[in-house]
């Protein structure tokens, strides 16, 4: 696969969401990843800066709640501080590949 084109789907095989619903959930994440910065403080932690609006913070929180319902290995924190909103995502060591895929997609969209 060429690295110039995004994958049609970025959800790894570990994703427990029904296959038919994955494109919709991926599109929800993509809408969050339109601005900001993507950082990886450590291998199991991803930090994504989002648009600093109440609407984006609410969407991020709602998405995080739904995502943990199907992929309980994720831990999400929506943090609003000093005029910034960020989404912190952590996983256990055995799910770093899932975080890698999320980081790749967030980096493509930011």
Image: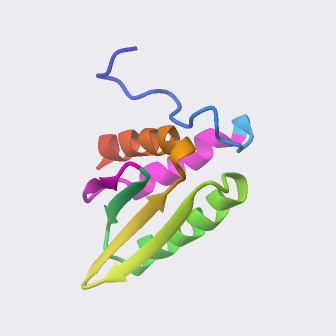
In the image, 90: left or right of 16? left
Residue drawn at (54%, 52%), measured in percent from left and top?
A: 92
Residue 99: horizontal and vertical position, in percent? 46, 45
**For the N terminus, which image quadrant?**
top left
The answer to which of 53 and 38 lies nearer the viewer is 38
Farthest residue to the front: give it.
Answer: 93
Farthest residue to the right: give it.
Answer: 18
Question: Which stretch did the figure color magenta?
Answer: 21-43
Farthest residue to the bottom: give it.
Answer: 82
Residue drawn at (44%, 49%), measured in percent from left and top?
A: 30
Residue drawn at (38%, 55%), measured in percent from left and top?
A: 46
In the image, 26: left or right of 18? left
Q: Is residue 44 above or below residue 60?
A: above
Number of numbered labels in the structure image: 0
Residue 86: horizontal and vertical position, in percent? 36, 69
Residue 52 position by quadrant? bottom left
Residue 58: horizontal and vertical position, in percent? 50, 75
Residue 16: horizontal and vertical position, in percent? 71, 43
How is the structure coloured here? rainbow
* Residue 27 falls within the magenta-colored stretch: yes
* Residue 32 falls within the magenta-colored stretch: yes
């Amino acid at each position: 696969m060429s690295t110039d084109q995004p994958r049609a789907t970025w959800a790894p095989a570990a994703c427990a969401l029904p296959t038919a619903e994955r494109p919709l959930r991926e599109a929800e994440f993509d809408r969050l990843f339109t601005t900001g910065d993507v950082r990886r403080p450590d291998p199991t932690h991803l930090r994504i800066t989002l648009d600093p609006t109440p609407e984006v913070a609410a969407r991020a929180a709602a998405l995080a709640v739904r995502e943990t319902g199907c992929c309980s290995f994720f831990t999400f924190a929506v943090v609003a501080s000093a005029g910034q909103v960020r989404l912190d995502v952590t996983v256990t060591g055995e799910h770093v590949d899932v975080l890698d895929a999320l980081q790749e997609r967030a980096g493509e969209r930011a």
